[in-house]
Amino acid sequence: MAIFRDHGENQVEHDRAIEDRRRHRQLVEKSIKENLGDILSEESIIGEAQNKKFKIPIRGIREYQFIFGRNNKGVATGTGEEKRGDKVGSSSDQPGEGKAGAGNQEGQDIYETEITLDELLDYIVEDLDLPNLDRKKYSEIIVESSGRKRGYQRYGINPRLAKKKTVMAKLARKQGKKRALMELGKAEELARFPFREEDLRYYKVKVKPKKESNAVMIFIMDVSGSMDNTKKYLARSFFYVLSRFLRRKYNNIAFEFISHTTSSKIVNEYEFFHKAESGGTYISSGLNKALELIREKYPPEVWNIYPFYASDGDNWSEDNERALKSVNELCDICNLFGYAELLPSTYSTTMYYRFLKEINKKNFVSVIVKEKKDLWYALKFMLSKELNEDI
């Protein structure tokens, strides 16, 4: 992406290029922000390297000038044959404008600029204007961890036994006994000289404090048959941008990934973003797996917990009540639960409306993405809601 630099006081006083560069930067930034939705919903954004570039159309800049006959607003002159209600000097009267077919007017210059994913995330941070939550919400816990070996000691556990040092301690004791016998005039050979407890030496390990995350993001995705390729790519884009953004904005966050159909399983990050499945849909299976994971690894009294769930909202009817119960249970133990419904079916009522009507929790946030371009607005709403509720 091009970088334009102002020369400030060293530049000629009336250099018009400075103003042109400033206007150009504003135009580039405006175009990037206007195209955020389209970029974030691209399938190719998933797993791309940091130097991956995305092209954004930019309208060209022209010098200000007076042009005769193109004033859409203001004073116009009639021919004297006008009647009450007629419009004088409207845009449709201009040649080549407001008419079907080929025109004879010059068009605007449009070119493309490029931006990397990291630069894109900078614009997301700027657009959201998020506060620094490290002290409160994404705080850290201090745990003890083993560091480097720092000397020896006479007690310890077997895995830390310093064998070489132990043998040296035994030999030193043996030599001391020999000298003592020689001083007493008993120069006899020691046939057997076993180890004793006092010979044992253990590595002394200095325990140092270590910061660990106590904030966990649990990403849950519906990968059932109703989630076609477009929906799955959109769900992955949603989670991918969310994870990249959170890793960039905050330190020491743990991530867990759950995919489900009628059954659920914990997967690694690569499988979550690349593996496809099919089958029926039990929304409660994914939510219950998150509850199980929290019970086993992330006690709510210690951890800040943020589950995010993405689906198209289609669920087997017999599972609806179980899903509602699971959402309520997650809201009771989590800081926030986010539900994103992507490209829902227009032929049936989806779970979005059930959740919206029956989940009365302040920490429950739901968004609906009816078009791919709505993905950015959904992310913006969910993050802004999550961050502003608890501050």
Image: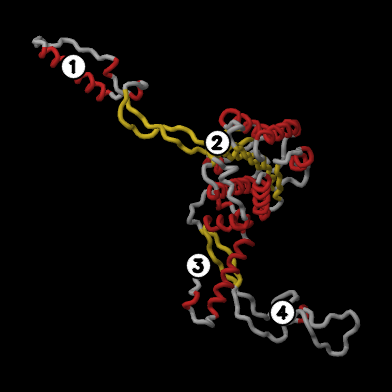
Name the residue tied to disc 3.
Answer: 2
Please tell me which residue lies in front, 346 or 177: 177
Give me the C-alpha separation between circle 3 and circle 2: 40 Å
Q: Amino acid at mark 3?
A: Ala
Q: Secondary structure at mark 3?
A: loop
The picture quadrant where one finds residue 331 is top right
Q: First in sequence: mark 1 or mark 4?
A: 4
Give me the C-alpha separation between circle 1 and circle 3: 77 Å
User: What is the x, y in percent for residue 168?
Assistant: 22, 23
Q: Secondary structure at mark 4?
A: loop
Q: Which mark is residue 267?
A: 2
Give me the C-alpha separation between circle 2 and circle 1: 59 Å
Q: Closer to the camera: disc 1 or disc 3?
A: 1
Name the residue tied to disc 4.
Answer: 96
Q: Secondary structure at mark 1?
A: helix
Name the residue tied to disc 1.
Answer: 174
Residue at 72% x, 82% y is 70
